[in-house]
Amino acid sequence: MTISYNSSPETLNVKLSGEIDHHSAKTAREEIDKKYRKDGCKNITLDMSSITFCDSSGLGLIMGRYRTVKEYGGELFVKNPASVVEKMIRLSGMDKLINVVE
Amino acid sequence: MSEKRNTVIKSTKKTCPQIVNYFKCTFPAKSINESYARTLVSAFVSQLDPTVSDMADLKTAVSEAVTNAIVHGYKESTKDSVVYLSGHYRTDGTVSVEIKDKGCGIEDINKAMEPMYTTSPGDERSGMGFTVMASFCDKIKVSSAKGKGTTVILEKKLSST
């Protein structure tokens, strides 16, 4: 999985590409949280349009970032989730909790 | 010596036609092999020309089971921590994949299969592994004995393209 960032003052924009599994999610969550704290943003947007595989570790990654932003009074946005991601979000009922945006 | 082995089967479909092809492999319980396992299964199943959606579902279910074996079965990885992966498909297009470990086993399978249940919440495990396996496959069979290991069998009938 590759991660790229594009920060605005309020929001850390994270673009995730490739496969999310337990192996890749571990590094991703550490990197994203580090960047979020360093940049001092309030919100996180996860662009998940270029994800080609996602298992429940992807849900863990989303839920974990949701908790992180809530700690700082921010919001989490999941942008353009690929069908594999959307299916997982729907299955878990997380779509009621997080903001899925286009 | 009698061994306490619990088995839970959740089934929606029955199958029994002849086996056409099969594979078998073993690999060390390292998280980097999660992608190896699902890629192997997808290469094997591609012989049946499945739909993109069926393929994605099966890959995800296999990934969940293999991750469980690595994360929960073998909590501490040693040189003997090996995951046993095998599978076959039948004339009617039913694929069966078996994921086996000789790790710590599951004490209460029904509890482990509850949605959102996890033994390691601090690790950002969603507790959705078995739910995903059960929803993305037609049948899941889990058998486990404490201290002996866990075997998960996933079955999915592929729709023809």
Image: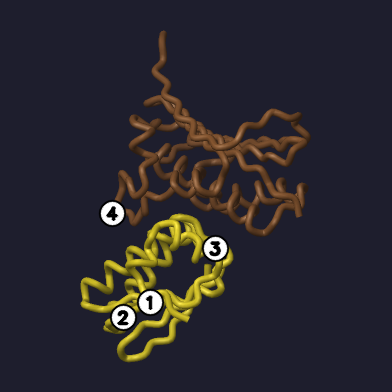
Marks 2, 4: nearer the viewer = 2
Q: Colour of chain B?
A: brown
> Residue A46, how many percent across, how many down?
42, 75
Query: Amino acid under label 4?
Result: Gly
Q: Which residue is mark 4?
A: B122
* Quadrant that contains the N terminus of chain B: top left
Cβ–Cβ below 8 Å for labels 2 and 1? yes
> Residue B6, how many percent across, how many down?
42, 24
Query: Amino acid under label 1?
Result: Phe
Q: Which residue is mark 2?
A: A43
Secondary structure of residue under mark 2: strand
Q: Nearer the viewer, residue A75 or B40?
A: A75
Secondary structure of residue under mark 4: helix
Secondary structure of residue under mark 1: strand
A49 to the left or right of A68? right
Rounded to the nearest angstrom, the CA distance separating label 1 from label 4 is 22 Å
Q: Which residue is mark 3?
A: A84
Marks 1/4 same chain:
no
Whether residue B3 is visible, yes or no, is: yes
Q: Which chain is yellow?
A: A
Q: Which mark is residue B92?
A: none
Q: Is residue A64 above or below residue A40?
A: above
